[in-house]
Amino acid sequence: MQPLDFTGIIKVLEYEGSIALGISSVPNQQWQPDKNHARFILQYLNVLKQKTEGNRTEAETSILDSVIEQLHSRFHSLYSTTE
């Protein structure tokens, strides 16, 4: 197993967020989008971004920004009328 680095942490949270938003599925399980969990993952990613400001590489910043944007966009496309 590879050591976990910052990008790996972002990817784990991206996967969890994509499951919470129904983008990805959990094998052999019925899964419905979970608005509260998706919101939590987005908040978590934004706190991670804020707390690591000035300590990320350009590549890490690009990946983090992309993941936040993708999950945020999906969240709002699902829930913008129910907020």
Image (cartoon, grey):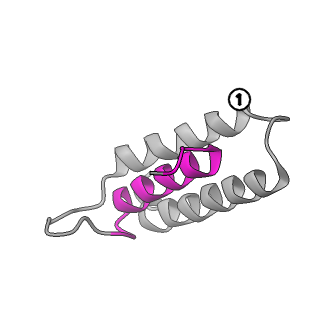
Total numbered labels? 1
| Residue at mark 1 | 51
Q: Residue furthest top?
A: 51
The image quadrant of residue 51 is top right
Q: Is residue 43 left or right of residue 59?
A: left
Using residue 53 as the reference point, say whether residue 8 is left or right of it.
Answer: left
Q: Nearer the viewer, residue 82 or 25?
A: 25
SS for dot 1: helix
Residue nearer the viewer, 38 or 58: 58
On the picture, is 6 further left or further right than 2?
right
Question: Based on the displayed image, in which of its 4 quarters is residue 15 positioned?
Answer: bottom left
Q: Is residue 8 above or below residue 23?
A: above
The residue lying at 76 percent from left, 59 percent from top is 62
Residue at image coords 56%, 51%: 8
Mark 1 crowdedness (10 Å alpha carbons): few <14, some 14-19, many ≥20: few
Where is residue 17? Give x, y as percent. 44, 55
Q: Main secondary structure of the magenta part?
A: helix
- Residue 10 lies in the magenta stretch: yes
> Which quarter of the picture shows residue 59?
bottom right
Q: Amino acid at mark 1?
A: Lys
Give me the residue at 67% from left, 53% from top: 64
Q: Is residue 15 left or right of residue 50?
A: left
Range of residues picked out in magenta: 2-24
Q: Which residue corresponds to the image point at 14% horizontal and 69% vertical from the top-left? A: 28
> Is residue 15 shown in magenta?
yes
